[in-house]
Image (cartoon, rainbow, N blue to C red):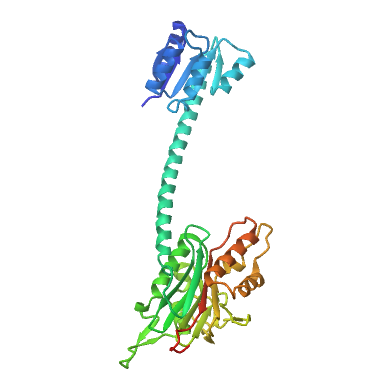
Amino acid sequence: MPDKILIVDDNVVNRKLLVHILQKEGYDLIEAADGEEAVDLALKEIPDLILLDIMMPKKDGYAVCRELKHDADTGTIPIIFLSAKATAADKIRGLDLGGSDYVTKPFDGGEVMARVRVQLKIQHLTNALLKANEELLSKQRRLDDDLKAASEIQKSLLPKGRLDIEAIDVAWRFMPCHTIGGDLLNIFRLDEDHWAIYMLDVSGHGVPSAMVAVSVSQMLRPQTGYLLKRAIHPSPFYNIVPPADVLSALDQEYPIERFDKFFTISYLVLNTRHGLLRYSNGAHPPPVILHKDGTLDLLDRGGTIIGMGGIIPFEEGDQKLRLGDRLFLYTDGIVEFQDKDGAFYGEDRFYQEIKRSKEEPISRTIDRIIDSMIHFGKGAEPQDDISLLGLEFKGLREGHET
């Protein structure tokens, strides 16, 4: 469709001259003889450009410009003032009110045409930019909705609420640095006495890392055959797969070239009847045991990152938990958290916070460690996903083995 131009001038000769100049370009031309008519026509027709005289009856050009610029429908229409008022102050006033250009009378036809073309071109580019921006905003809104949905799916893979486990108290915090992240943790029952615990950290951030984390979490379920193997004997009819073998299986299933990603993981099996803990780490920060006497043990047996294709066998470690012992699993987003000056939160500070936890509920300890890290950061935003899980071994009620 041709561009629509509104010509506003109380002098009919000037209007006809402008019509004569512009109609050769095929524009759709409409005319107004005074300021009030100009406002009415502009609001009704929404032209692409307005040529506006200043000295007019009923409402001058300045008032017309001010009114149209304050209306949402006409606020972006370019206005070229046409006036015999040629002082710098007059031009500045018109431009300050929102005018796009200023042509003094008597005007030259070639100059008017050139300025009209320029303003229409700018208007077309502006409209195209506004349209593209709205499309981008619409796509961003859809992407945000998708990310929120993905975040809820990822959260659904975390432990469900407060676990009703007689022998242990468990608490955790999961803080992706974006809407979704590459960290994931869980604790779930393998059989009456055994619980699986894992924490993993996929390289990178955002959607690709989160998708790999979700995929791994689907493998680490009892029904997949990776954690429990069918046994020949009838009772029990299964064997619990040793943690080192679980990591070896993951290493084969997730070579780096498959997703261009690798991940670290700690996988543990806890016998809640006897407090026996078996574990293996795939280059993950070693879990920490806080003993009742205040000493720390690091569970550092394991091997390389997951995805190296079995170049080094995974080692396995054992620990005996006593009543009151606490176990902590975490991702490196905690110890590598930096304040605004670039200083790291660090392992020493983390271990000291763990040692302070002996006399408080495990849930309070987890919250306090995270609060300590945030306070250390002095307002700095995390640059990596942050996950922390704490477990206190309470043993079974009197009459059961501990």
Position of residue 260 relative to residue 252, above or below, is above
Residue 30 picture quarter: top left
Q: Is residue 21 visible?
A: no
Picture coordinates of residue 210, whole percent (x, y): 45, 64
Name the residue at 59% across, 57% down: 381
Q: Is residue 356 left or right of residue 117?
A: right
Residue 127 vertical placement versus 175 (above, below): above
Residue pictured at 55% horizontal, 10% vertical = 105
Q: Nearer the viewer, residue 389 or 302?
A: 389
Q: Residue at x 55, y 75 (%)?
A: 328
Percent position (x, y) of residue 375? Answer: 63, 60
Picture quadrant where residue 138 is located: top left
Q: Which quadrant of the rendered structure holds the N terminus?
A: top left
Residue at the bottom extreme? 233
Q: Pick out the residue farthest to the front.
A: 398
Q: What x and y, as percent, mark residue 118?
A: 51, 25
Residue 325 falls in image quadrant? bottom right
Give the total of numbered labels. Answer: 0
Can residue 207 be seen at all in this image of the molecule? Answer: yes
